[in-house]
Amino acid sequence: MEKEPKTVIALMSGTSCDSIDAGFCEVAPDMSVKLLKGINHPYPEHIRAKLFQAFRGEINIKELCQLNFAVGKCFADAANILIGEFGKPDFISSHGQTVYHYPYDEKIDNISLKSTLQIGESSIIAKETGCMVISNFREKDIAHGGQGAPLVCFADEKWWGKGGKYREKNSDENFRGGEACSSKSYAIQNIGGISNVTVVSDECDTFGFDTGCGNIMIDYCTQKFFGHKYDKNGEIATSGQVCESWLDCLLQDEYYYINPPKTTGREYFSNKYIENILKTAPTEPQDVITTLTALTAKTIAQAYERFIYPSVHIDTVVIGGGGAYNKTLMKFLRSYLPKRIELKTHEDYGISNNFKEVMAFALLGYCNYYNIPNNLPCCTGAEKRTVLGKITY
């Protein structure tokens, strides 16, 4: 089948569960993606509350069944806002809402229990919008022995790798063996609820992993102590001090020492986990927020030191996700990263920090449509390249 440009509405909601991110995109055969418009469509209050109950394991099977269809309707509502403005796309690409992700090699009766669950019933989205829907991207990677994440690495490689739209020429006059060096190495760092990085370089195959907690613990404690959903622009973190002894204790968590490929989520950095670490937290709430903000930045920097720098010389770190708007977090990152590394955000490349992952899932859907393998085993640990996603007509 000859590839043609396609219009795609991409839908997703991340671990922060702050809204449904929807984007009307144009995807070209060269794998470039243009975002025509993105919206953050809020969940109805009671649906969002029910989702957080699901994250905590506080709902029964009946409620989970109902929630799958209710979230599908919410996703369809988000898509229909864009359809009302742009008309129907060629298809919808929906990541869904992750409610549980279990990437571990546990077995029962010698059968693997590695699994993942994204809700937001695609049949409801298809019925309510009248569009074909491509969804459920993570399962196929897990079926092939992977961890089902991170998946955005595929888009990062297409966009920042050789020939990619956002790849820059290296202006440094470096020489290797008497010849000018034009290689370029990027760490594309997303900071959502969880933080994940993709390394795109001429020096090695693309690889990526979850570096650890992103905004989950910051958001939880901002809500707990200040009654806000998140620390806007890092303003609360600016008013506190880093408790170095508590930070050092938090940095000892075993996840940060596990070799990639690896992925994590709310199942690990749960409310119970957060309440447990708060038992030894500083007494001033502002210091809690500041220290947790420093933790996110330092775990990213240490992940680079342990798992990236030994094999790749990074030139540029590109930050995306909600964390890119947190000025205090960005300051911590700048202080923890080597000065030689250039620190940018996705918006320096004309990509919204807020909608980069939406654009990535538009690309994943496009590849499914044309039967193009769209996972990266070096990032997820899968046995082979495969086509991710299921189609609902």
Image (spheres, rainbow, N blue to C red):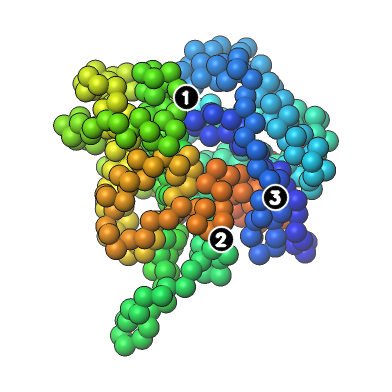
The residue indicated by pointer 2 is 158
Is label 3 or label 2 in front?
Answer: 3
Q: Nearer the viewer, mark 1 or mark 2?
A: 1
Asked if residue 234 shows in the view, the reply is yes
Q: Could you tell me how far apart the alpha carbons at marks 1 and 3 are, in whole angstroms?
A: 28 Å
Residue type for callout 2: Lys
Q: Quadrant of residue 176?
A: bottom left
Picture coordinates of residue 218 (x, y %)?
A: 38, 29
Residue drawn at x 79%, y 48% is 90
Q: Is residue 381 found left or right of 282 in the rendered image?
A: right
Q: Which is more N-terminal, label 3 or label 1?
A: 3
**Amino acid type shown at disc 1:** Lys
Contact, CB < 8 Å: mark 1 with mark 2?
no
Front in this rendered view, residue 37 or 359: 37
Identified at 51% across, 62% down, the residue is 160
Q: Alpha-carbon neighbours of circle 1 within 10 Å: few (<14), some, or many (≥20)?
A: some
Q: According to the image, label 3 marks what residue?
A: 36
Badge 1 is on which residue? 229
Q: Answer with left or right where residue 369 lies relative to residue 64.
A: right
The residue sitting at the left extreme is 245
